[in-house]
Image (cartoon, helix red, strand yellow):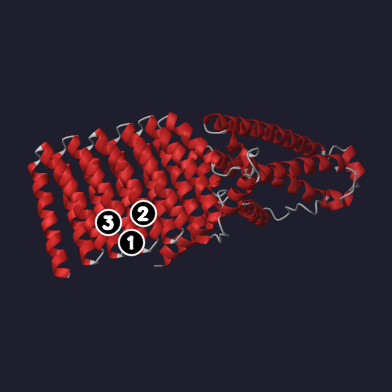
Amino acid sequence: MLPNKLKEKYNELADFFDRPAWKNRVLFYLAIFVSIAAAFLIVFEIFKLIFSDLSILNNTAYTQYNATDLSNMGFFDNERYLLSALVQSLAATIALVITLSLVAVQLAAQSYSARIIDVYKRNPDMWILLCIYIITIFYGLGLTKIIGLGILGNYIEGAIFVAYFMGFFAFVCLVPYMLKTLDLLKPSTVITLLAEEITKEKILEFLDNGDDVDEKDPIQPIIDIINNSLDRNDYETVRNGLKAIKNSTILIFENAHFLIGEEDKVASRVLQHVERFGTQAAKKENEDSTLATIQILEKIGIKATEQKLEEVSIKTSLTLGKMGVEAVKQKLDKVASETVKALGNIGNEITNVELKNASWASVSNIEKVGVKAAEQGFREVIWNTSKELERVGIKTAEKEYKSATEKAIDALEKTGIISIEQELEKEATRIAGSLHIIGLKSTKKQLDNTAIKSVEALVNLGTKAAEEIFENTLWMTTLAIGKIGVKAATQV
């Protein structure tokens, strides 16, 4: 039990130090400094035990000669050479490190987006390392200048020891800096850092400042990265980018306090970016990336619904509807099916939290995808459209949302008639069954006009089936009309 707790504490501490905030990174390098200082002191004490006359601060030469005599005797020559070599090596090292860092930034910018330069500019490690080297170099230069002048007296040896210690510390700091820089070359790390910039305040600031400050759009850098990744078929980076946008958006919905209209602005901006990317992925017939976009939109829509942000729910449904239609156009039937399911899940959640207008919007967008799929003869999409319209239609009938339920009936009727025209008998029969169930539920809830509308839809569907000699569909519509009639009679 104890080792697990220690492991958890260690992981928490590691996560704290690994964050790129100034406070965390300064504490991290300070911890390295203290650790090295403690190691030096321990080694020094061990040497004192072995060599009893070892002393840094009290060299016996200072008791016999003054600083000028010692300098003339060449007492400080080794120190000067060592300090000079240390300063030169530190200067050469930091110049090389900065050059390589800038090359890494250039490569990353070319590979992903010029906007990620800001990530490297905000990285505290580079500035902290630069400060450590500047302080150490100028300390070494200053110490080289005053050696032999007697300014520090007997403490000159201690000052020289500090210079060696600082040089060692500066070189050790290269290790975490290089690890951090290499980590920043990974797109997942860059995406995580960029996602932290996606906040309500920054999105609204961008929208309020007009079109001439595009670089301040906090979402655009991640969109640039996933667009470039899409061209290279780097699906992992695409998924990571979409997840980052989704997580940041959900965090905004959960924690932000919105004034009137603000949630609509924030959602519109986020959905606009995601829709553009998803449409581009669909046009390139990239099924994996388009599916990932649909899943992200679904999660955003469900979270917005849970928070009862009705306008956001409506906009998300509208975006999914557009994505679904585009998927059908590009003959991505699996993507279109998943879009219908996502709209059904959102519609179901909308009805649970009683967002009346949003429920109508979800049904309307399922209809758009279903009708387009029926025109193209996509059987699986039609089947899922029938299933989701039935599920949402039952829910809205239970809540007595007449307009949403009637919209579901209209959508089923239209999809069913087109299915018959496309000679898809099984799908048309399935749609008749959905109309039957919604009609029974409407009758049970005494939604008379809605029940009548379902019967009319079944009649129209049956008439069309009779013209095409679809026996199963005709049988189902006749059976459904009869059962709804019986149910209505028993309700009187």
Quadrant containing the N terminus in the rendered view? bottom left
Q: Residues within 10 Å of mark 2 (few under 14, many from 20)?
A: many
**Is disc 2 placed on a helix, strand or loop?**
helix
Check the image and report above or below for 134 versus 437.
Answer: above
- Residue 178 pos. (x, y %): 58, 39
Marks 1,3: beta carbons within 8 A: no
Check the image and report above or below for 458 versus 353.
Answer: above
- Residue 381 pos. (x, y %): 25, 41
Residue at point 14% right, 66% down? 489
Quadrant containing the C terminus in the rendered view? bottom left
| Residue corresponding to mark 2 | 360
Q: Nearer the viewer, residue 248 or 370?
A: 370
**Is disc 3 placed on a helix, strand or loop?**
helix
Residue at point 41% right, 35% down? 279
| Residue corresponding to mark 3 | 393
| Quarter of the figure with residue 323 | top left
